[in-house]
Image (spheres, rainbow, N blue to C red):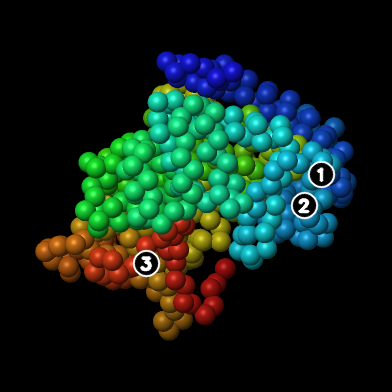
Amino acid sequence: MAVQDHDAYWHPGLETQSRADWRQLQLDLLKDHLRHAYDGSPYYRAAFDAQGVSPGDLHTLDDLRRFPFLDKATIRDRQTAVPPFGDLVAVPEREIVYISASSGSTGVPTASPFTSKDFEEWIDYEARQFWSSGLRPTDRYAHALNFSLFVGGPCVMGAQKLGALSIHAGTLPSERLLAVLNQFRATALWTTPSYAWHLGETAQSEGIDPARDLAVRRLFVAGEPGGSIPETRERIEALWGAEVYDYYGLSDIFGSCAGMCVEKDGLHWAEDHILVEVLNPETLEPVAEGERGELVLTTLRKRARPIIRFRTGDIVSVTTEPCRCGRTSLRLKGVHGRLDDMLIVKGVNLFPGDVEAVVRQDPALTGEYRLVLDRVERLDRLTVEAEHTQGFNGDLEELRGRLRRQLKAATGVGAEVALLAPGTLPRAVHKAKRIDDRRQHVWS
């Protein structure tokens, strides 16, 4: 049952319970979930047996470390081996009422199935998350995410469940989307950080000031690390005159699994749906709270296709420190990059987000950037391409030197800097591609 508008929480008792209560709830759910996976899924039965573990071996949450990992390649391989959904599925097909699909890097679509109960619980969580970010029944919410099999599409139903007027905008051309936002005076919008930036720039090129001429006062962003990078978030907020809230999700579980509350101090996890581990990607041992590691996720309620110890490839940090909003759930403090986006430059691990935080703090730069890597005489060379702002009349050499020093201080990597005219770099309509790696051989 949803709470009334004057209340701060969607599910007050759940969202403010003690950490001990969260852990007990997760343990109770996990015991049942592992049994369901083992009994219903041929894959999990074989994987658990091969590992020499069974659901009855779980007595504490730490016991989950005895169970095998899962990754995207395995999900795809099992779907190919046992079409159409794979043998991770733990319910009869007649119970599946919805699928999303993600193509991933190979272009082979992988389905994420839901039972009716899975779907209803997912949408209730989306409503809870929107509520925590300040969305209310008085808002007009525009959902500018892809609806074509994309798991982010149905998240709009969370806004509808909450009571907001919802506009299923989808991936309209920028000029058309701006017209829709203006016509219906939308007060909230969900898209990617790069597209929020691009859309604001497009508005300005048409003589529209997003902060003055449009009614959008809340921007929900997901799909890239930018929403949790303060410098990026603040630049988008200034462009739109709106508050920006970062969300995190993945198609293999459900839409948004974590999101910022109005305090914007990390992303609250759906801990009654997902158990979070943060592991050293080399040793696969837990890292200390606050340290960076690979995000590993286990579903706790999803019946159609349980996901047990899924290695996401995302490098994150988390905290259990209390949030000023009163919610007690684990918070994601940042998605710092991906294992497959991590660059090793002169022996230093580097993520695009590390560079983004530097580039977007300087008002003399547009905020667009690209990392170009090549190898000269067997040595790595990194060039950071960035654009100066329109009408910049300062000293370009001083700006180049300043950016080079800031990058070195922030990342530990010495980089060349190429300053380009505004509009030179390609603008991203959805997820931005920030790396041009021209090295013939990349050392691991």
Q: Secondary structure at mark 3?
A: loop
Precedes in sequence: disc 3 or disc 2: 2
In the image, 38: left or right of 26? right
Q: Are marks 3 and 2 in contact (CB under 8 Å)?
A: no
Residue at 25% x, 65% y is 422
**Image location (x, y in percent) of residue 7:** 45, 16
State the residue at coordinates (63%, 55%): 102
| Quadrant (top left/top right/bottom left/bottom right) for the C terminus | bottom right
Quick one: label 1, few (<14), some, or many (20+) residues within 10 Å? few
Residue 120 visible in the displayed image: yes
Q: Report if the CB atoms under discs 3 and 1 are less than 8 Å apart.
A: no
Which callout, 3 or 1, points at the residue further toward the start of the chain?
1
Which residue is located at x 22 percent, y 63 percent?
Answer: 388
User: Height in image: 49 above or below 378?
Assistant: above
Identify which amino acid the numbered label 2 is placed on: Phe
Give me the C-alpha separation between circle 1 and circle 2: 9 Å
Residue 323 numbered tag: none
Q: Residue 394, how many percent across, how many down? A: 12, 63
Visible in this render: residue 220? no
* Residue farthest bottom in this picture: 377
Residue 171 location in percent, x, y? 47, 53
- Report how far apart the C-alphas of labels 3 and 1 lie in the structure: 44 Å
Q: Is residue 407 left or right of residue 254?
A: left
Quarter residue 323 falls in: top left
What residue does disc 1 label?
Answer: 93
* Image quadrant occupied by the N terminus: top right
Q: Nearer the viewer, residue 349 or 332?
A: 332
Mark 3, residue position: 426
Q: Which residue is mark 2?
A: 85
Q: Residue 417 at what x, y percent from top left?
A: 29, 69
Q: Are marks 1 and 2 in contact (CB under 8 Å)?
A: yes
